[in-house]
Image: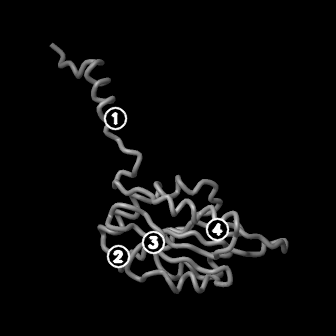
Amino acid sequence: QAASGPSVQEVCSLSLELASSHTPATMSGVTVADECVEKYNQIKMKKDLRFVTFKIQDKKQIVIDIEGAKDQGLTDFVSILPEDQPRYALIDLDYQTDDGREQSKLCFVFWSPDDKTSVKDRMLYASSKDAIKKKLVGIMKELQANDLGDLDTDTVMEYMKK
């Protein structure tokens, strides 16, 4: 006699149970504060900031960390990143295309200094990244940086041109 698996009814019941227990947050349970979306809209529409960084507070919520004024640049942005903790960031980058046109695009940056960050923090930030990206609708570019070399001016500008 062949072994039988779960009935269709049991599978449907389990599926419903799992679906109803799923929260709109990430698998890590981290949520995104409304202020993050408001800041994204500000930098996108008003263009009055160069960058904003976000951190996970108390392992529960993504909140605003540091803002950079419009007159600051990529070097200023890199200088405020913690050397031993991950961050998410938005930076409004000005660059010139290969055919000489001036461009400006928002770039989402996931900063995760792998050699100096705890495995727990790296896992928490990696598993929560989609939550903030889903809230920041319309991001054109995304960059992951694991060391300062990844944020070198030439490297970033070449990436933005792609």
Tag 3: residue type?
A: Arg
Give the CA distance from mark 2 to mark 1: 34 Å
**Horizontal and vertical percent position of residue 16:** 33, 29
Q: How far apart are marks 2 and 4 (CA)?
A: 28 Å
Q: Which of marks 4 and 1 is nearer the N terminus?
A: 1
Q: Which mark is residue 43?
A: 4
* 30 shown above or below 92: above
Q: How far across and down, in percent of the image, does residue 102 sit?
A: 80, 73
Mark 3 crowd level (few <14, some 14–19, many ≥20, 10 Å Cα) = many
1 or 3: tag closer to the N-terminus: 1
Q: What residue type is labelled 1?
A: Ser
Q: Distance between the residues labelled 3 and 4?
A: 18 Å
Whole-number angstrom distance, CA of label 4 to CA of label 1: 36 Å
Give the residue type that dot 2 points to.
Thr
The numbered mark at residue 87 is 3
Which of the two discs, 3 and 4, labels the residue nearer the N terminus? Answer: 4
* Label located before the other in sequence (2 or 4): 4
Q: How is the image coloured?
A: one colour
Residue 57 locus on image (x, y percent) = 37, 68
Numbered disc 4: secondary structure: helix
Residue hosting label 1: 20
* Residue type pointed to by label 4: Ile
| Marks 2 & 1, CB-CB < 8 Å contact | no
Mark 3 falls on what kind of element? Answer: strand
Residue 148 sits above or below residue 120 on the image? below
Q: Earlier in the sequence, mark 2 or mark 1?
A: 1
Q: Which of marks 2 and 1 is in front?
A: 1
Which numbered tag is attached to residue 125?
none
Question: Which image quarter: residue 49?
Answer: bottom right
- Disc 2 marks which residue? 117
Q: Most extreme residue toward the left, as rendered? A: 1
